[in-house]
Image: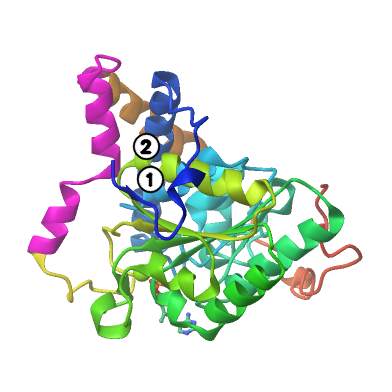
Amino acid sequence: MNVRPGHLPRNEQRSDYRPLSIADKKRLLHEMLFARRFEERCYEAYVERKIGGFLHLYSGQEACAYGVLEAARPGHDYVITGYRDHIHAIKCGSDPKAVMAELYGKESGVSRGRGGSMHIFDVPVRFMGGYALVGGPFPLAAGIAKGIKMKGGDEISICFLGDAANNQGTFHEALNIAKVWELPVLFVCENNLYGIGTRINRSTAVMEQYKRAAAYDIPAAQADGQDIEAVHKAASVAVDRVRSGKGPYFLELKTYRYRGHSMSDSNAYRSKDEEKQWLKRDPINILRNRLVDDKALSLDDFKAMDREIIDQIENEIIKFAEDSPLPVASDVEKYVLADGDPWVFPGRKG
Ligand SMILES: Cc1ncc(C[n+]2csc(CCOP(=O)(O)OP(=O)(O)O)c2C)c(N)n1
Ligand SMILES: [Mg+2]
């Protein structure tokens, strides 16, 4: 397992680490396969023009969100990310039907159809949003962590962002103040090697992202983002450290996205050979093969799981999104500004 400790002192590795059980791994395989099928169905719905606006898919990167959040407490900890956000919200506990309905621009969507793909937002499960502005969530994650510290809770703030986001000024501002104030925030860098069509070596002086946290004296680690067990192990150290009040932490996950940056990206800048090499390290196949090798799963079980997921997505999730009403035109000025408590989305309980 490829877990590199960065400048984290070795004696701070977790001694009480509980590896994922067979039952955990089977559930996570189901969750990651669900995520893959959900995203691929979004692709189709976009081509059919059922989904409009921008659409950024997460296929290939599933082990990052599932591995980290499995080590955290989804629904209790606050999570924030960029525009590639559907799956993080679902792992936090958002109803996949309401996420799909949001992509369809329907009133039953998590953001009442006003946000669309890049702006999934679900306060009751503490998913604090997807954001279109690259690097925008860094200071928001630090602010949430400051709020947690002031209120005295045991929650942590988790910020997932891409490699290119680390070149924004907000990265440096947020890491600096997070360290000065020893905030309970975990920064997770999903390093998929590209910022739209620009490869990391053309834009970034320090390519191993975990090293950049050293500039702010923040402990950091790097893990294989295609191997959910490696992600879970590294994230367990990170989450435990942040939750125990030792301040911020930075975790870099090496990963790859299979689709273009967004639906409007022809993906012409990557070599077929590079794509093929990464496909060999598919996070779902890696976990499935381990379970098969352990005789905990047969390939027929896997196929049945896949069929059941495809049916569920079609018959429950897509159907719900298709059948839901669009927002009415007279409500166009509603929900532009929050009424009352800004932590509660208007019109929703929680
Ligand atoms: C402030 C800002 N600048 C530029 C853009 C255009 N933009 C959208 S995504 C992106 C690349 C981000 O790449 P990365 O952070 O690696 O995330 P990934 O898409 O790979 O998940 C850019 C430059 C933007 N949305 N916001
Ligand atoms: Mg990237």
Q: Earlier in the sequence, mark 2 or mark 1?
A: 1
Question: Where does the N terminus fall, quadrant-wise?
Answer: top left
Dot 2 alpha-carbon crowd within 10 angstroms: few under 14, some 14 to 19, many 20 or more: many
What is the residue that sits farthest to the left in this orientation? 273
- Give me the residue at 26% from left, 58% from top: 258
Question: Relative to residue 311, is residue 130 depicted above or below?
Answer: below
The structure residue drawn at horizontal position 24% and vertical position 45%, both measured from the top left corner, is 282
The answer to whether residue 210 is visible is: yes
In front: label 2 or label 1: 2
Where residue 273 appears, as percent x and y from the top left, is 8, 62
At a point 49% along the width and 76% down the height, the residue shown is: 215
Is residue 25 rendered magenta in the image?
Answer: no
Farthest right residue in view: 340
What is the x, y in percent for residue 41?
Answer: 37, 49
Residue 96: x and y in percent read: 55, 44
Q: Which residue is mark 1?
A: 63
Residue at 60% of width from left, 42% of height from top?
Answer: 95
The stretch of residues the image draws in magenta is 273-300
Q: Secondary structure at mark 2?
A: helix
Q: Is residue 19 above or below residue 45?
A: above
Q: Position of residue 70 (x, y in %)?
A: 51, 38
Q: In the image, is residue 164 above or below residue 241? A: below
Q: Is residue 291 magenta?
A: yes
Q: Is residue 323 visible?
A: no
Q: Secondary structure at mark 1?
A: helix
Tag 2: amino acid: Glu
Q: Is residue 26 left or right of residue 201?
A: right
The circle drawn on residue 325 is none
The main secondary structure of the magenta stretch is helix
Give the labeled residue for mark 2.
229
